[in-house]
Amino acid sequence: MMALARTVTILAVLGATHAYAADIGYLAPPGVPAKEFPSPQRPVAQIVSPSRSGEEHRDSLDEAGEIARLLELKPGMSGYHTVRLSRLVGPTGSVVAQDVTRDYLVELARRTERLKLTNVMFALGEPHDPRLPASSLDAAILVHMYHEIAQPYAFLYNLAPALKPGAPVGIVDLERPTSEHGTPIALLHCEVTAVGYREIATYQLAGDGGYLAVFSAPEQAGRKSPRDIVACAARASTR
């Protein structure tokens, strides 16, 4: 998948839509501004490439299938690895591929058009805000890109309203420092729970696929004020 490493691929029941490059933009109004949230007390990895590793190697590990099974994705829902799980969710479901770099989405849109995948949508986001419609998502998956989110507290806070009640959020990353394009599990848990998300489970993926950490979002009525969120200390990454 061309934009997999940085794409937040969202499971969303938004209807089958054929996405063309010219259609790519924000799907929702802006959420809470980044200035309202604390900044992370750790390095943020630079965006260096729209892909993490060769697709053949990832297919040999059945990365998409393993994550789909762990999150219990089914036809009629949206998918995760855009190209591969577009077929899994079928014509009654849809996949929303979201990224902050429009060129990556344009490239992926052209690929899905060549493959005649008609249940994929594309959503431009901001570094602190995915800009997705309220209560539209059956699940969300952040794939090998959490360490590149410059404003993780704002991003997670603005993502929560887009999730349907009980929708899981799966984060795939590597157990290594954020400066080395990974996120230590201890640090991830600290940052995500600081926003009010609840940990469900953590799985080790096959081969060098890293881990899948699954969380549930806070309910709207119980969400913290952005100014009440406390940034995790850098030492959380070594615990």
Image (cartoon, helix red, strand yellow):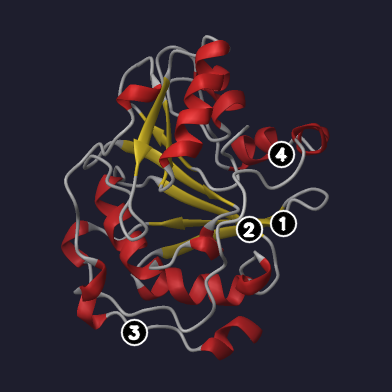
Q: CA distance from mark 1 to mark 3?
A: 27 Å
Dot 2 or dot 4: first in sequence order is 4
Residue 134 in the image: state x and y as whole percent.
Answer: 21, 42
The answer to whether the residues at label 4 and label 3 have Cβ atoms under 8 Å apart is no
Q: Which residue is mark 1?
A: 210
Q: Which residue is mark 4?
A: 63
Which residue corresponds to the image point at 65% horizontal and 43% vertical from the top-left? Answer: 51
Report which quarter residue 120 is drawn in: top left
Q: Which residue is mark 2?
A: 173
Which residue corresponds to the image point at 52% horizontal and 9% vertical from the top-left? Answer: 116
Q: CA distance from mark 3 to mark 2?
A: 23 Å
Tell me the crowding category of disc 2: few under 14, some 14 to 19, or many 20 or more residues within 10 angstroms, Cα based. many
Q: Is residue 239 above or below residue 49?
A: below
Task: Inspect the image, locate mark 3, and give the three-letter code of the amino acid beneath it.
Answer: Val
Q: Which residue is mark 3?
A: 230
Q: Secondary structure at mark 2?
A: strand
Dot 1 or dot 4: first in sequence order is 4
Q: Secondary structure at mark 3?
A: loop
